[in-house]
Image (cartoon, rainbow, N blue to C red):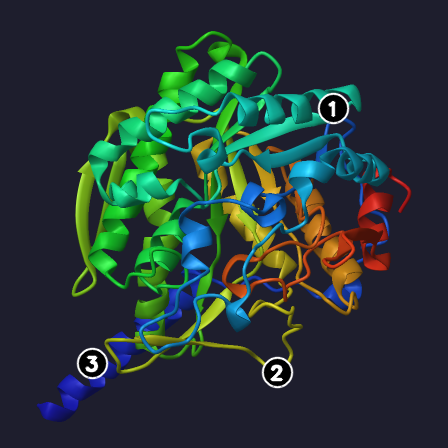
């Protein structure tokens, strides 16, 4: 009897593993048989590059500038080597010359964010000088035939908002809506594309699960609550702005990072369970919410939440897709660190703990196409200080985009991250994502050789 039960248990285990293999394949292309030297796109395709205010402007007084001064419970600095953003790339003052760099790339669009803490330094105060500054920058972009794409929240918010509990509290959403309405009122007559919130799942997981982002907490249930509130904030902002003057003709979207989590050992059921749980939290819970209006995370011992918002179903004119790579997860028996991230010998690594995995961008496009709205790739790029892999990265990922379009997916644009080297959050200035390198002592910008592949594809000269 025991042997029979054991036998059936083994058979069941094998059937489950086989089902997972077939249901969730890890797409791999034979790049030796793929030519990336001639990649074509529709003439209407949107080409761009991107930055975020705190990373390039510097001199901010917000939740991130405060976080940069602190350290973790173990005494280690919050930011690598105690680096602080400082004046960053001084984009606040140098934006006219940086717009010339955008022009040099041949792209037609520039995605940037406005710094909430500069625009609204106190809850009852709006700084007209800051509003005028961004207005002038938008005008210079338009004068250079570059279409502005404005992000309202890119990881940062004022300290006073942080002290109120930020997005930990549902009642604070109304404060964010008021800020968004103010900015929309100022610029909606000359900005066509708007992004509400950048990467809500990253804000929630890194700020409230791993502790790598402010406020540096490690509370999985609170992480789920914050994610729910951020998504609801997007929905409420979308519908609020749509009712304002210019709202009906403006295109508004949410920006979501997709990162596939794969089992390290495809024969190990616990690796499968762990990767499915993390994928559910980070990816599918958001997509399901936007598709059905139901936000649901049920991971025993970590997070348990159920929320309905029918207004979420039609709350986007396009979907902003950020994609960099995927991760392999290996289950380990630890409540503090229930999994480790592993890399294979054949993986081509970037300077970040990412691999070059162009197939993943194709898969991400497939997954978000379920939302049935146009897809804008709002971020994609590589940290590569030696500039030895940037050309390979650009060609492989843009091949994946071109293949997706050829296969019928509605991808309307691509923004390379980023225009220039900048303050890369918890990694400080060590990660070099820029098409242009930056000497942070002289503020000199220089086009990288590897970036020329992007220019050639944009100008259809490849």
Q: Which disc is residue 8 wearing?
A: 3
Query: Camera-side residue: 287 or 254?
Result: 254
* Label 2 crowd (10 A; few <14 / some 14-19 / many >=20): few
Location of residue 144 in the rendering, given as x and y in whole percent from the top left corner:
80, 24
Q: Is residue 189 above or below residue 459?
A: above
Q: Residue at x 89, y 47 (%)?
A: 462
* Label 1 crowd (10 A; few <14 / some 14-19 / many >=20): some
Q: Which disc is residue 140 wearing?
A: 1
Q: Tell me whether the residue at label 3 lies in contact with that at label 1, contact meaning CB atoms closer than 8 angstroms.
A: no
Location of residue 54 in the rendering, given as x and y in whole percent from the top left corner:
54, 46
User: Viewer-nearest of labels 2 and 3?
Assistant: 2
* Label 3 crowd (10 A; few <14 / some 14-19 / many >=20): few
Q: Is residue 16 above or below residue 4?
A: above
For numbered disc 2, what is the local secondary structure? Answer: loop
User: Viewer-nearest of labels 3 and 1?
Assistant: 1
Instruction: Tell me if I can see residue 283 in this picture.
Output: no
Tally of numbered discs: 3
Q: Quadrant of residue 32?
A: bottom right
Residue ID for mark 2: 345
Q: Which disc is residue 4 wearing?
A: none
First along the sequence among labels 2 and 3? 3
């Amino acid at each position: 009897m025991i042997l029979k039960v054991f036998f059936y248990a083994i058979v069941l285990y094998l059937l489950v593993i086989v089902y997972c293999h077939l249901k969730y394949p890890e797409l791999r292309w034979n790049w030796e048989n793929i030519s990336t030297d001639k990649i074509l796109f529709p003439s209407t395709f949107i080409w761009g590059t991107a930055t975020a205010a705190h990373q390039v402007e510097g001199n901010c007084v917000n939740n991130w500038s405060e976080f940069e001064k602190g350290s973790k419970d173990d005494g280690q600095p919050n930011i690598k080597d105690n680096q602080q953003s400082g004046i960053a790339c001084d984009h606040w003052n140098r934006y006219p010359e940086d717009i010339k760099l955008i022009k040099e790339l041949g792209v037609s669009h520039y995605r940037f964010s406005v710094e909430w803490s500069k625009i609204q330094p106190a809850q009852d105060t709006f700084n007209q000088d800051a509003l005028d500054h961004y207005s002038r920058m938008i005008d210079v972009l338009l004068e250079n035939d570059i279409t502005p794409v404005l992000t309202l929240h890119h990881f940062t918010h004022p300290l006073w908002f942080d002290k109120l509990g930020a997005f930990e509290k549902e009642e604070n959403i109304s404060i964010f809506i008021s800020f968004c309405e103010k900015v929309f009122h100022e610029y909606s007559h000359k900005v066509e594309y708007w992004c509400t919130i950048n990467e809500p799942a990253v804000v929630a997981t890194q700020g409230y699960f791993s502790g790598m982002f402010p406020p540096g907490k490690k509370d999985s249930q609170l992480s789920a609550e914050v994610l729910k509130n951020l998504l609801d904030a997007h929905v409420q902002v979308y519908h609020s702005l749509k009712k304002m003057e210019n709202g009906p003709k403006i295109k508004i979207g949410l920006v979501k990072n997709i990162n596939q989590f794969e089992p390290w050992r495809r024969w190990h059921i616990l690796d499968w369970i762990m990767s499915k749980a993390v994928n559910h939290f980070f990816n599918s819970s958001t997509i399901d919410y936007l598709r059905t209006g139901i936000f649901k995370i049920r991971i025993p011992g970590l997070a348990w939440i159920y929320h309905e918002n029918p207004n979420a179903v039609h709350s986007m004119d396009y979907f902003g897709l950020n994609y960099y790579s995927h991760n392999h997860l290996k289950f380990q028996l630890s409540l503090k660190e229930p999994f480790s991230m592993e890399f294979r010998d054949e993986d081509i690594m970037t300077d970040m703990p990412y691999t070059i995995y162009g197939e993943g961008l194709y898969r991400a496009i497939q997954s978000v196409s379920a939302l049935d709205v146009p897809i804008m790739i709002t971020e994609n790029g590589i940290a590569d200080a030696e500039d030895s892999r940037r050309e390979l990265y650009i060609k492989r990922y843009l091949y994946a985009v071109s293949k997706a379009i050829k296969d019928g997916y509605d991808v309307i644009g691509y923004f390379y991250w980023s225009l220039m080297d900048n303050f890369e959050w918890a990694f400080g200035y060590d990660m070099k994502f820029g098409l242009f390198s930056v000497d942070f002592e002289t503020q000199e910008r220089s086009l990288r050789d590897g970036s020329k592949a992007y220019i050639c594809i944009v100008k259809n000269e490849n």
